[in-house]
Image (tube, helix red, strand yellow):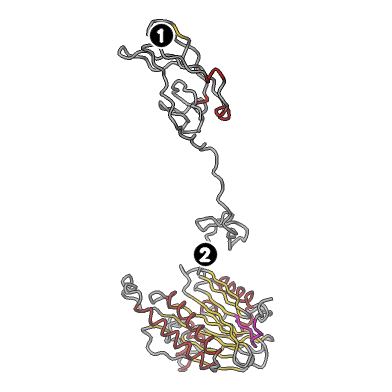
């Protein structure tokens, strides 16, 4: 590579007038190539040691008495980068005459290698390769989501992974949402679908609600839902009766939540006065002719027939309000209006008083859907008739759409709690059927 001609020192950039330092080859502000600046007009002649006047040369720093004056550098016009690679002319290839005694050149000997030209800061680097589909905003459904998790169109902060979950598994579907008031989603769900020994199929839905007053309620609900669903699917596939399989699944889920109380060892150091991890559970198993539900706590299951006559609540809450009503001390309206209404009397966790899994089996005489949900939904549709009014008419063929509608119903009502709902068609359709 040929060396660029050396120019006189400049005090400021010819392009942007930014102050320069001695030896700068590019402007630090705009990136202007200072080597392309034409030399200044002739000023003073350069004198050789013998006193002869030499052709005009670029003006450099004044020489001292102890230093001989430099010989002039050859005047070479600035050339574009492409010209630097051009072959030298015949005159340039001729050997240079030996320098006269006492004369030195104003440029250092050419090194073997030269530093590459610095990149122009005004040029944008090549874009990164495509990393896949760009996330779309869940609020406006149009804007792209930036790296910080905000929509570039409407500015809406995108939910964390567990803040909003949707799943469709065969004929059953579920949706879980953080709601509008909680800082995290402490609900969880798990879905399953398996073949029975007689060749028919069964669908499974488990919904759990973490107890907010306990430590790590989100871990408790996740562990309970997954353990119960796995236990149910395995037992049903081996021919266990659905009601017995449901009971055993609740016991297995309780053990999984109990185990969280001891791991990790430092889990309670940050909240020593909180209870051990805890949650409620409600689940359903639907086969070709049988509907089984099981629960502990105040999460519920509703039966909604296609013809809406009549809808029914299939579970009884383990709560203070339910105990007051069962004892005849209060009406249902009075009990649920009390501030103690949602205090639960049964749950899964190491500090539960006693584990009492509830199970019930039904044989509906018409098609419909089972709505399995936390109190984040039924607080806004408590009576069976109210829940039936919120469930879309085509829920049996569009369970995922129906679950979304029900979550929206709770959010429109205020969304004070986490909301989780599973929609399970009855009877269980053949394996592989799903939403239309």
Residue 395 belongs to magenta span: no
Which is nearer the N-term, disc 2 or disc 1?
Answer: 1
Residue 379, position in %: x, y?
Answer: 53, 79
Residue 135 falls in which quadrant of the image?
bottom right
- Given residues 150 and 191, the one toward you in this image is 191
Element on which disc 2 rests: loop
* Residue marked by disc 1: 47
* Residue marked by disc 2: 159
Residue 343, position in %: x, y?
Answer: 43, 82
Residue drawn 44% across and 26% down? 110
- Number of residues whose C-alpha sits closer than 10 Å to that of mark 1, classed few (under 14), some (14–19) or many (20 or more): some
Pair 2/1: label in front: 1
Residue 138, position in %: x, y?
Answer: 58, 63
Q: Is residue 386 visible?
A: no
Q: Is residue 166 visible?
A: yes
Q: Is residue 398 above or below residue 68?
A: below
Q: Is residue 42 above or below residue 166?
A: above
The residue sitting at the front extreme is 95
179 vs 305, left or right, is: left
Q: Is residue 86 above or below residue 253?
A: above
Numbered mark located on residue 155 in the image: none
Numbered range of the magenta stretch: 423-431
Element on which disc 1 rests: strand
Gap between marks 2 and 1 measured at Cα: 78 Å
- Given residues 234 and 105, the one toward you in this image is 105
The total number of labels drawn is 2
- Number of residues whose C-alpha sits closer than 10 Å to that of mark 2, classed few (under 14), some (14–19) or many (20 or more): some
Residue 191, position in %: x, y?
Answer: 55, 80
- Given residues 301 and 20, the one toward you in this image is 20
Residue 428 belongs to magenta span: yes
């Amino acid at each position: 590579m040929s060396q660029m001609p050396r120019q006189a020192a400049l005090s400021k950039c010819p392009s942007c007038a930014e102050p320069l330092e001695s030896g700068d080859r590019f402007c630090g502000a705009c990136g202007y190539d200072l080597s392309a600046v034409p030399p200044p007009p002739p000023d003073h002649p350069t004198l050789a040691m013998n006193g002869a006047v030499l052709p005009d040369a670029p003006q450099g720093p004044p020489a001292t008495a102890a230093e001989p004056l430099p010989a002039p550098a050859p005047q070479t016009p600035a050339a574009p980068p492409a010209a630097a690679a051009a072959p030298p002319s015949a005159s340039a290839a001729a050997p240079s005459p030996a320098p006269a005694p006492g004369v030195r050149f104003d440029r250092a000997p050419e090194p073997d290698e030269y530093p590459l030209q610095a990149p122009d800061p005004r040029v944008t680097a090549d874009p990164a390769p495509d990393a896949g589909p760009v996330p779309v905003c869940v609020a406006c459904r149009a804007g792209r989501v930036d790296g910080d998790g905000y929509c570039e169109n409407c500015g809406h902060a995108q939910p964390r992974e567990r803040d909003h979950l949707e799943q469709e598994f065969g004929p059953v579907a579920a949706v879980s949402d953080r709601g509008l008031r909680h800082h995290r989603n402490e609900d969880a769900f798990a879905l399953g679908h398996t073949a029975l020994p007689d060749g028919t199929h069964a669908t499974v839905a488990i919904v759990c609600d973490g107890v907010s007053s306990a430590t790590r309620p989100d871990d408790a609900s996740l562990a309970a839902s997954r353990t119960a669903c796995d236990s149910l699917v395995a037992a049903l596939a081996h021919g266990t009766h659905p009601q017995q399989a449901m009971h055993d699944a609740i016991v297995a889920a309780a053990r999984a939540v109990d185990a969280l109380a001891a791991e990790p060892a430092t889990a309670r150091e940050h909240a020593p006065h909180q209870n051990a991890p805890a949650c409620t559970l409600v689940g359903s198993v639907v086969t070709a002719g049988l509907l089984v539900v099981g629960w502990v706590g105040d999460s519920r299951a509703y039966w909604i027939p296609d013809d809406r006559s009549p809808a029914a609540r299939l579970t009884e809450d383990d709560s203070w309000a339910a105990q007051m009503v069962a004892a005849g001390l209060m009406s249902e309206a009075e009990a649920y209006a009390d501030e103690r209404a949602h205090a639960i009397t049964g749950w899964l966790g190491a500090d539960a008083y006693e584990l009492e899994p509830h199970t019930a089996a039904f044989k509906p005489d018409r098609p419909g859907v089972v709505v399995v949900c936390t109190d984040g939904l039924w607080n806004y549709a408590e009576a069976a008739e109210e829940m039936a009014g919120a469930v879309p008419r085509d829920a049996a063929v569009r369970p995922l759409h129906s679950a979304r509608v029900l979550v929206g119903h709770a959010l429109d009502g205020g969304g004070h709690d986490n909301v989780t709902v599973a929609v399970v068609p009855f009877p269980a359709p053949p394996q592989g059927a799903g939403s239309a």
